[in-house]
Image (cartoon, rainbow, N blue to C red):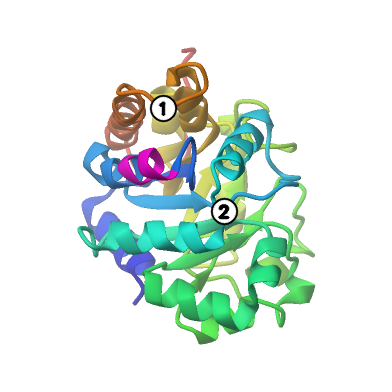
């Protein structure tokens, strides 16, 4: 079992959902980004998604786009991102780490080299948002052969005819995008999310984690009642940005992010995990 599979199995025994947190590698700089990554498990993150900065992040909203630009401006690249994971693994060998991003930087790095270096760094899975199932030979199947999870996204527009293709080579968990549009664009409709999660679960035994638009502990609690995981990215990245001092890291950045993640974790842990997503109370 991968760390991702082990973590979801452990959480099933606990009877609760996972909190999956997204941060951008190298935002706002390499040192602060690593400090945030190290702080996330202590704050309550169960799985860490680490963004691979890219110049054209078409699925991301303004907050994550800006995070990627800050990281690129600070000199972040694939080599440094994998170095972050290696440094993280020096003190934490149990928290699952997923790299999330786009295929272009992987293609430029070289798929075979990338998978070798990702594995040795201690990465557990990949989310590559712009590779459809029709391109599984390109990266998905080599990733699975390397012993890593390849996590695919299902969306509100993924219908019954398309869903089997999306799920066919997916492993680790299914990432359900709760809204149409880019990351952080809106808050999820929990009633629609409940129906979508139930529909996906009729087709797969994999855990289903819900992301895009989850911003508050109350959102997280409502989603965690029925989903197997709650993914939060834009809210964390925006809290980081707001804590910067004239665009640069200061002493408060890690604390601000940790406090938000702790609040989100309390929301997830407060959920009554009934198998049906609850309506969110107004925040």
Specify the label residue 128 is tagged with. Answer: none
Quarter of the rendering occupied by the N terminus:
bottom left
Residue picked out by circle 1: 249
Q: Eyeballing the image, is 154 above or below 131?
A: above
* Near-viewer residue (28 or 196): 28
Whether residue 31 appears in magenta in the rendering, the answer is yes
Q: Residue at x 59, y 38 (%)?
A: 212
Image position, residue 261 (x, y; %)? 34, 32
Q: Eyeballing the image, is 54 above or below 123?
A: above
Which SS class for mark 1? loop
User: Gap between marks 2 and 1, in whole Å?
Assistant: 20 Å
Q: Which residues are magenta?
A: 30-35
Specify the label residue 52 is tagged with. Answer: 2
Binning the other alpha carbons within 10 Å of mark 1 as few (below 14), some (14 to 19) or many (20 upward) gives: some
Q: Residue at x 36, y 69 (%)?
A: 122
Which SS class for mark 2? loop
Q: Residue at x 36, y 26 (%)?
A: 253
């Amino acid at each position: 079992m991968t760390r991702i599979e082990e973590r979801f199995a452990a959480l099933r025994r606990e009877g609760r959902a996972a909190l999956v947190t997204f941060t951008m590698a190298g935002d706002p700089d390499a040192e602060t980004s690593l400090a945030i990554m190290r702080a996330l498990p202590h704050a309550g993150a169960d799985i860490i998604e680490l963004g691979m900065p890219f110049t054209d992040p078409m699925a991301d909203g303004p907050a994550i786009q800006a995070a990627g630009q800050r990281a690129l401006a600070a000199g972040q690249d694939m080599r440094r991102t994998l170095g972050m994971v290696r440094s993280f693994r020096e003190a934490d060998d149990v928290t699952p780490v997923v790299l999330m991003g786009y295929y272009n930087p992987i293609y430029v790095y070289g798929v075979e080299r990338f998978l070798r270096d990702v594995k040795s760094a201690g990465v557990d899975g990949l989310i590559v948002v712009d590779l459809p199932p029709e391109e599984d030979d390109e990266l998905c199947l080599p990733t699975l052969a390397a012993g890593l999870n390849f996590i695919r996204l299902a969306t509100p527009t993924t219908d019954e005819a398309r869903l089997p293709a999306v799920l066919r080579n997916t492993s680790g968990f299914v990432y359900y995008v709760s809204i149409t549009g880019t990351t952080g664009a809106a808050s999820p409709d929990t009633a629609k999310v409940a129906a979508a999660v139930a529909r996906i679960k009729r087709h797969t035994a994999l855990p289903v984690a819900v992301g895009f638009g989850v911003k508050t502990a109350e959102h997280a609690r409502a989603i965690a009642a029925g989903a197997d995981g709650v993914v939060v990215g834009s809210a964390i990245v925006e809290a980081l940005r707001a804590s910067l001092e004239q665009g640069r890291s200061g002493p408060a950045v890690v604390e601000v992010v940790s406090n938000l993640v702790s609040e989100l974790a309390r929301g997830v842990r407060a959920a009554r995990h009934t198998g049906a997503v609850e309506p969110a109370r107004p925040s």
